[in-house]
Structures are given as C-alpha cells and as structure tokens.
Amino acid sequence: MKNLIDINDLSIEEINELIEVAKDIIQNREKYSHKCDGKKLATLFFEPSTRTRLSFEAAMMELGGNVLGFSEASSSSVSKGESVADTIKVVGYYSDIIVMRHPKEGAPLVASQKSLVPIINAGDGGHNHPTQTLTDLLTMKCEKNRLDNLTIGLCGDLKFGRTVHSLITAMSRYKNIRFVLISPKELEIPEYVKKEVLDKNKIEYVETNNIEEYMGNLDVLYMTRVQKERFFNEADYVRLKDYYILNKEKLQKAKEDLAILHPLPRVNEIATDVDEDKRAVYFKQAEYGKFIRMALILKMLEVK
C-alpha cells in the first residue's frame, strides 16, 4: 500500500488484518520492538495535535525506529512561502514514511502525488482522519468483540467532524450497522454523507437532537467536541459549544455494556464524573491508537 489518504484506500480485509496485527502487538510487545530498526518516520503537522502526533511518534519508537519533523507550520519553511509539494519532496529524502496533518482539505492527497515515500493522512480540515477511524475500529473490536450488529450513536458536531465522516464510511461496510445521529440542526451530518454513504449502502439511521431519547438502544456512543477552529462565526460556536454534555444522569437508561468513545481532546461535552464509569473507554481508546498505528507503519513499510 503506497499511501493512506482516505479510509476507503483500505479494503475491509486490510482493515481486519491491521486490527489483528494490532491485537498481536498488544499481546506480544517485545516481538515487535526491533521491526523498524534504522527506519525514520517524519511527522509534518501544519495544524496542532497532541494524541495523533505523539501516538505516531511513540508507535515508531516502540518499533525501534526514529522520528523527525515539526509540530506547527510556523516552525517549517512553509512560513517562508515554501509550497507543501516542495516540503514533501525534500522530507522524502530524509525519511522512509511521512505522516501529515493539514488544515486544507485535500492537501495530503496533493502531497502524496509529489512524495517519494508513503504518506499517511493524519487529518485534513473537516474531511478525513483515517487513522483515527482505525483507532475507533480497534477500540470497538477489543471492547465489544465485534464490528457488526452494532447500534452506534454519534453525538455533537456531525457537520465538521472528520472523525465522524470517516467512521460512518468505514462502518457502512460491516453487517447490520445502525446509526443514531445526535446533533443540533446547525451541526447535522452533511447531505453528501447521507446520500453517498448511508443511503447508497442502505444503512439504517435516525436523526435526533435529544441525546437521551435513544440512549437505551446504543451499543456504542461516540461523543465529539464542537470544534471552534471550524467556525467562521464566534457567536455560533459559543451558542452551540455546550449543547450536549454527557453526565451520569444521562447514562441512567444506557446498557451496562455500552462503550463510550471520544476522539479527544475533550472540552465540556463529557463531564469528568463519567471518567470513572467502566463504560468510558476514551482514554483507553487513545492507547489503542498507538497500537493500530504501529500495525499501519509495518504494513506501509512492508515489514513482515
């Protein structure tokens, strides 16, 4: 596999294979500790990140490889006017694989057409975040022991949430999946996602603005933050940012084995009193992200 720009770049067989490798890494850490000796991962983050960047760096280090890169555009020659294409071409001479996050949708795709080495999209605007989706799938597989026959609630910013769009796309390929789409009117799932993914694949879904209405039906609840950086109007952000806050009271009707996920960072949308609930797996989810990224690096570098 040359690049990972969109979750659709992976077949369902490849996704399942990555999940199995990640599960093996969890069980046999030592076995993988020198798999990438001598290899270098470049992290080019033109937009802020904590978990994605650090988990990729930790993943490569745990595989025995090295890491180089930058964590903000201002610390690269882009601030001097260098094009992304030129940056990518140069960094390809210094590394074996590149992880890239960019605020412009489509930037990693353009970069992949100029790159000498494999490119992994670590998020492009409100568009795609395929490795977060792989993290979500591994989390569900480990916590629910299946990726089919699930009712998944997606709550919060469904309009700009790239993690939500990628997850819907990925899960639409598994059997008997139902979605409950929970958001205020202004942050509803985009029409193209409904048309091109949900309707096209005959996926059952309902839309609601009430988080408690379907709580008892859910196997997975995927919370998201309202993203300030995606809003053009600060007043709209302030009005909507605390629209949904998950707390213990709202979980009263939830199943005992509900899995609560969140791509993080959390702002106000999950009360801290939920953190101690055994159904809260969002911090564990961040750790699963490291293991699935280790599996992905191995696959893209064709390391056996």
Image (cartoon, rainbow, N blue to C red):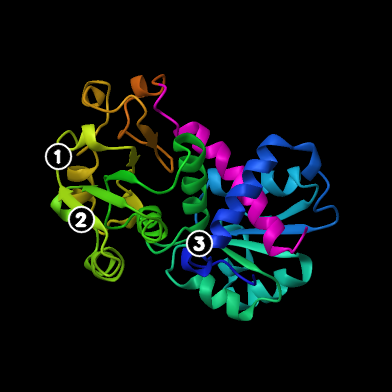
- Mark 2 vs 3: CB contact within 8 A: no
Nearer to me, 20 or 2: 20
Residue designated by label 1: 210
Q: Element at badge 3? A: helix
First of labels 2, 3 by sequence position:
3
Disc 3 residue type (three-letter): Ile
The CA distance from mark 3 to mark 1 is: 32 Å
Q: Element at badge 1? A: loop
The CA distance from mark 1 to mark 2 is: 13 Å
Disc 1 residue type (three-letter): Asn
Question: Is 282 colored magenta in this rendering?
Answer: yes
Nearer to me, 201 or 207: 201
First of labels 3, 1 by sequence position:
3
Is disc 2 surrounded by few (<14), some (14 to 19) or many (20+) residues within 10 Å? some
Q: Is residue 281 above or below residue 65?
A: above
Residue designated by label 2: 188
User: Quadrant of residue 301 in the image?
Assistant: bottom right
Residue designated by label 3: 12
- What residue span does the magenta drawing correspond to? 278-304
Q: Point out residue 40 in the picture as x, y percentages from the top left corner.
A: 77, 58
- Horizontally, residue 79 falls left or right of residue 158, namely right
Q: Is residue 252 visible?
A: yes
- Mark 3 vs 1: CB contact within 8 A: no
Q: Is residue 2 above or below residue 291?
A: below
First of labels 1, 2 by sequence position:
2
Is disc 3 surrounded by few (<14), some (14 to 19) or many (20+) residues within 10 Å? some
The residue at the point 43 percent across, 40 percent down is: 265
The residue at the point 37 percent across, 28 percent down is: 257
Q: Point out residue 50 in the picture as x, y percentages from the top left corner.
A: 54, 44
Q: Is residue 25 above or below residue 95?
A: above
